[in-house]
Amino acid sequence: MQPSFKQQVNSQFALIAQALASPQRLEILDYLAQAECSVEELARLTQLSVANTSRHLQTLKQAALVQVRTAGKHRRYSLAGDDVVQLISSLRRTAELHLAEVERLAQTYLNDKAALEAINADELLARMARDEVTVLDVRPYAEYAAGHIPGAVHVAPEDLASQLHSLDDSKTIVAYCRGAYCVYAFHAVQTLQQHGLSALRLAEGLPEWRAAGLPVQRVN
């Protein structure tokens, strides 16, 4: 018997769900939300073999979640669109609402109450308009160069303690990184507060900022 229209279209939806049903593929999507990457770069970031990374990318490509372009001898992967970021954000929010283990893990690994305090994009924009904040990007430089909040200062996570003197301590520093569970921003806020600086965390990361249609600046 020929499958019904609903059965056929649901099978297409299931391709997306199946592609997301892997912590390794979710991690790959997280990195691709920051910047375009090669298979080799993703393998290094995820600590997977190149062959395994390539297989995961093919699954994501078959589900139309990533796209690829050829640059010389290399193939460069990127997200198929900002809607993929929105999809993963929805997945995260649903998990936060319905899976108690998500909260337990957050309380276990992100247990500094002061660093947990965060502001949203609308509040950050308002504070930026009033020139009340210094925005701090603590992702690796290649990700910052590929796109960052306009005016954001870049300091690599490992360099923050030695670069505190370069930050304007007359303003609140708002740190952001890859996303809601990226530890770089948590650690940055902890370090800044331990040195007596006023610091907050942006609730989400650059991918969510860009997916919301907010301005992004690149390093030329």
Image (spheres, grey):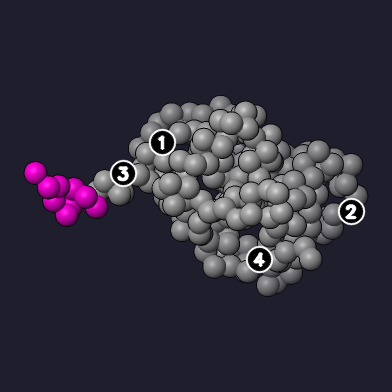
SS at circle 1: loop
SS at circle 4: loop
Q: Nearer the viewer, mark 4 or mark 1?
A: 1
Q: Nearer the viewer, residue 212 or 65?
A: 65
Q: Which residue is mark 2?
A: 166
Using the image, tell me which numbered label, if any, was put on residue 216: 4
Highlighted range, magenta = 1-9
Quadrant for the N terminus in the image: top left
Residue 170 placement (x, y as % from top left): 82, 59
Q: Which residue is mark 3?
A: 14
Q: Is residue 208 toward the left or the right of residue 8 in the image?
A: right
Residue 207 placement (x, y as % from top left): 58, 55
Q: Which residue is mark 1?
A: 21
SS at circle 2: helix
Q: Nearer the viewer, mark 2 or mark 4?
A: 4
Q: Nearer the viewer, residue 24 or 56?
A: 56
Q: Earlier in the sequence, mark 1 or mark 2?
A: 1
Q: Are marks 1 and 3 in contact (CB under 8 Å)?
A: no
Q: Residue at x 61, y 45 (%)?
A: 31
Q: Earlier in the sequence, mark 1 or mark 3?
A: 3
